[in-house]
Image (spheres, rainbow, N blue to C red):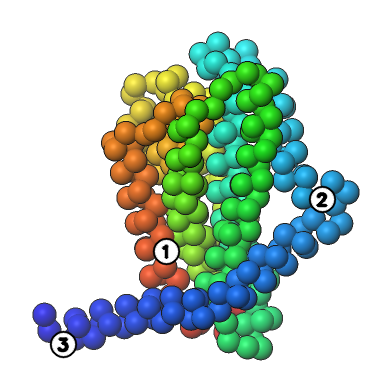
């Protein structure tokens, strides 16, 4: 390998490692940002943090009424199936949207003092993870109402939750980078999210997907992550290795890719936001 190639590789690797080191040093600031985001979000809300649990429950009730005649026949305990999918999807959609927007909102801090740029994205993902954990409460309530038993497989749930966070973090880093250069990305992403949701078995069961488009659907990384999240909840079993590794590859791969793209451009953010 030539010295030029070694130098180019070092130029890409060093910022990524340096950002990781700085992120560890500012770990207490991350906790403060998470606390601030949660308090700010629910400060003026009458229901407070309970809204995090009631919001997916209300959405589930509406969608269950609308789609129960279409999907409930093929999907036992359809409200539970629907809510489990909505929880995972809402986490992904809300966390990546917040990660993209928060880098712009934090521009004032970037101009005043040095902080790791990725700290904003990470705090957005962690805040959304807190909301995802809280949303498990209405899911348990629905399981009791429907008399839908939950087995020991639910102890596996932290694994797909962590993989969802990895994938959302990688997507959030990519979106944050794009948003700094192209402010319209935020509005465009909402359209992408809507299309992405309908291409993912969130509100409909995967077994109704026509054979001729199953290959296309399986190119969707959220298909694997959502399936892995639902298996211990809805199917009540541990996933097989063939169901785990695609989710791991997509989640870890996207996180690494997003990290390298973000850190290679982060030094320019203070001048562009």
Q: Residue 3, which numbered label?
A: 3
Quadrant in which residue 121 is drawn:
bottom right
Q: CA distance from mark 1 to mark 3?
A: 26 Å
> Mark 1 or 2 closer to N-term?
2
Q: CA distance from mark 1 to mark 2?
A: 33 Å
Disc 1 to disc 3: CB gap under 8 Å: no
Observer-nearest residue: 45 or 212? 45
Residue drawn at point x = 49 percent, y = 76 percent: 24
The C terminus lies in which quarter of the figure?
Answer: bottom right
Q: Residue 163, which numbered label?
A: none
Callout in the foreground (1, 2): 2
> Mark 2 packing: few (<14 Cα in 10 Å), some, or many (20+)?
few
**223 is higher (above) or lower (below) than 248:** above
Q: Position of residue 194 (x, y in %)?
A: 58, 41
Q: Secondary structure at mark 1?
A: helix
Callout in the foreground (3, 2): 2
- Residue 123 visible in this rendered orientation of the protein: yes
- Residue 188 visible in this rendered orientation of the protein: no
Q: What residue sits right under mark 1 in the picture?
A: 258
> Mark 3 packing: few (<14 Cα in 10 Å), some, or many (20+)?
few
Residue positioned most to the front: 152
**74 is higher (above) or lower (below) than 16:** above
> Mark 1 or 3 closer to N-term?
3
Residue 116 vs residue 166: left or right?
Answer: right
Q: What residue sits right under mark 2 in the picture?
A: 48
Q: CA distance from mark 3 to mark 2?
A: 58 Å
Residue drawn at point x = 39 percent, y = 76 percent: 16
**22 is higher (above) or lower (below) than 63:** below
Q: Position of residue 14 (x, y in %)?
A: 34, 82
């Amino acid at each position: 390998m030539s010295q030029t190639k070694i130098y180019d590789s070092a130029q890409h690797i060093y910022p990524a490692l340096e950002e990781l080191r700085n992120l560890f040093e500012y770990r207490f600031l991350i906790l403060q940002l998470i606390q601030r985001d949660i308090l700010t979000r629910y400060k003026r809300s009458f229901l407070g943090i309970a809204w995090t649990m009631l919001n997916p429950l209300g959405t589930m009730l509406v969608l269950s009424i609308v789609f129960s005649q279409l999907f409930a026949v093929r999907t036992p305990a359809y409200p539970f199936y629907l809510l489990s999918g909505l929880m995972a999807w809402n986490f992904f959609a809300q966390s990546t949207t917040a990660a993209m927007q928060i880098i712009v909102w934090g521009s004032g801090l970037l101009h005043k003092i040095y902080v790791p740029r990725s700290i904003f994205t990470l705090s957005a993902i962690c805040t959304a993870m807190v909301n995802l954990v809280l949303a498990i409460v209405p899911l348990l309530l629905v399981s009791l109402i429907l008399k839908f038993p939950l087995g020991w497989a639910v102890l596996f749930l932290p694994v797909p939750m962590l993989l969802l966070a990895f994938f959302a973090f990688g997507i959030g880093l990519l979106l944050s980078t794009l948003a700094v250069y192209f402010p319209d990305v935020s509005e465009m992403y909402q359209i992408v999210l809507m299309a992405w949701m309908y291409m993912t078995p969130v509100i409909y069961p995967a077994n109704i997907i026509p054979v001729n488009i199953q290959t296309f659907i399986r190119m969707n990384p959220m298909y694997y992550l959502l399936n892995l999240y639902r298996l211990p909840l809805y199917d009540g079993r541990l996933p097989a290795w063939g169901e785990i590794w695609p989710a791991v590859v997509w989640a870890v791969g996207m996180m690494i890719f997003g990290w390298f793209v973000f850190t290679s451009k982060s030094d320019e953010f203070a001048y562009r936001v």
